[in-house]
Image: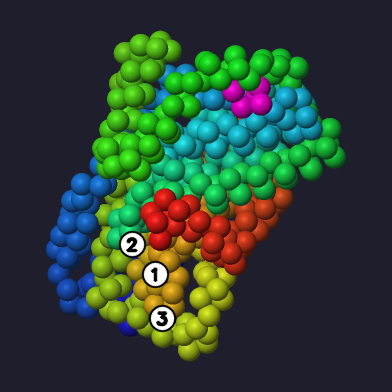
Amino acid sequence: MDSFIFMMALFVALLFLGLPISICIGMGVSAALVMEDISLEFVAQICFSGLNNYTYIAIPMFILAGLLMETGGLSQRLVDFASSLIGNIPGGLGIITVLSCMFFAAISGSSPATVAAIGSMMLPQMARNGYDLHFAGALTACAGSMGILIPPSIPMIIYAITAEVSIGEIFTAGFIPGALIGGGLMLCVYLVSRKRGYRGAADFGKSPWQTFRKAIWSLLTPVIILGGIYAGIFTATEAAVVAVLYALVVGLYIHRELKFSDLYSIFLNAALTTGSVIVILGFATAFARYLTMLQIPQMVGKLLLSYTNNPTVILCLFVLLIFFTGMFIETASQILIYTPLFLPILVELGVSPVHFGIILVIGTEIGLITPPVGVNLFVVQGITKSSIVQLTRNLAPFLFSMVACQTVLVLFPGLVMFLPNLVYGR
């Protein structure tokens, strides 16, 4: 237990010193192993064996697919279609941003990719139409975070592998929570915009049918990917490869906005993004294995159960915990750390692993917009040139809405489990 306390103290200290999260985890685990007289070869072996998983191939493929779709014009057509549906109502451009992020989330699987793709198009539009740029940036960061909740989703794949649950089932469970959070953000935009006088744009008046025809290839993407998974035609990993091939064909030969000269930079960016994710996954897998060796999950379970055996109370405490740690710990790391810690306890108390997975993913989603490690804020900052402080000041209504929706899903698990039970006949 002393080695665990030292490991966590070292982890937190290194985190506050500003070291990359992968280094913090790796050095913490290594220091704990030295204290336990365990060879450091353990870390290398666990990192390799943990990453030697066929399903993980889906991660770089979905990252690559999102970049190809962004460059190939699929995201622009989704924005145009969303614009034609909303019109010039109060907060119209903000609502279009949320709706576009929901559409793009269903084809990219990545929150930063969603923020970059939609933000680069919508933020200049909102600025030109009188929206406060810091407010617009905060909204885009929050709306883009749905990239990890609305399937397909890379964090959901990581959770499914860690928790040993069906990827198709966790994907299915994401639709209603995604719609609930998206609806909450739209309501916030409408209320704030009505007070401040923000509206849509005059040139956003194309007919829905016209924009739908242009966006048909974009809208078919989630149908092909998710339809193939649910119909049993291909696995989630194979679906990611199909998404890459589909994005290439549509971008190169149908929309003709993707050039062969673009492919080098796209593949390079995908490789760099994948590399950073994989390093974190490797060390976090070793961290999770070390926790299991020390029986830390069992200790945490006994501690929690000594205070309460009410699963709803435990989930509410977990929501508070992940809100705090989400400010400092990256998405994949939280999933790999908290799944072995909390899932065994909650399953024993009758909580579905799918329900817990959605609550966990929403918690990591909120972590993407809370500084100092709010990745989405840094993506938006690069587009708007706002400071993190200016963006954070405008987060309050959106953050409140997202936490409120997460709490509703804790209290009413039927909202999460309705579609999985319907599709999988439980």
Q: Which quarter of the figure has residue 67?
A: top left
Q: What main secondary structure does the magenta stretch of the protein show?
A: helix
Q: Which quarter of the figure has residue 313?
A: bottom right
Packing grade of label 3 (10 A; few <14, some 14-19, many >=20) is some
Tell me if 38 is positioned left or right of 156 in this view: left
Name the spot of residue 288 as percent of width and height, x first: 30, 66
Q: Is residue 84 magenta?
A: yes
Mark seen at residue 343: 1
Q: Is residue 274 visible?
A: no
Q: Which residue is mark 2?
A: 163
As drawn, the residue found furthest toward the bottom would be 306
Residue type at mark 2 is Ala
Q: Is residue 377 above or below residue 385?
A: below
Please give the name of the residue rendered at 48% of the width and 52% of the height, measured from the top-left corner: 419
Q: Which residue is mark 3?
A: 301
Q: Is residue 10 above or below residue 371?
A: below
Looking at the image, is mark 1 or mark 3 earlier in the sequence?
Answer: 3
Extent of the magenta region: 81-85
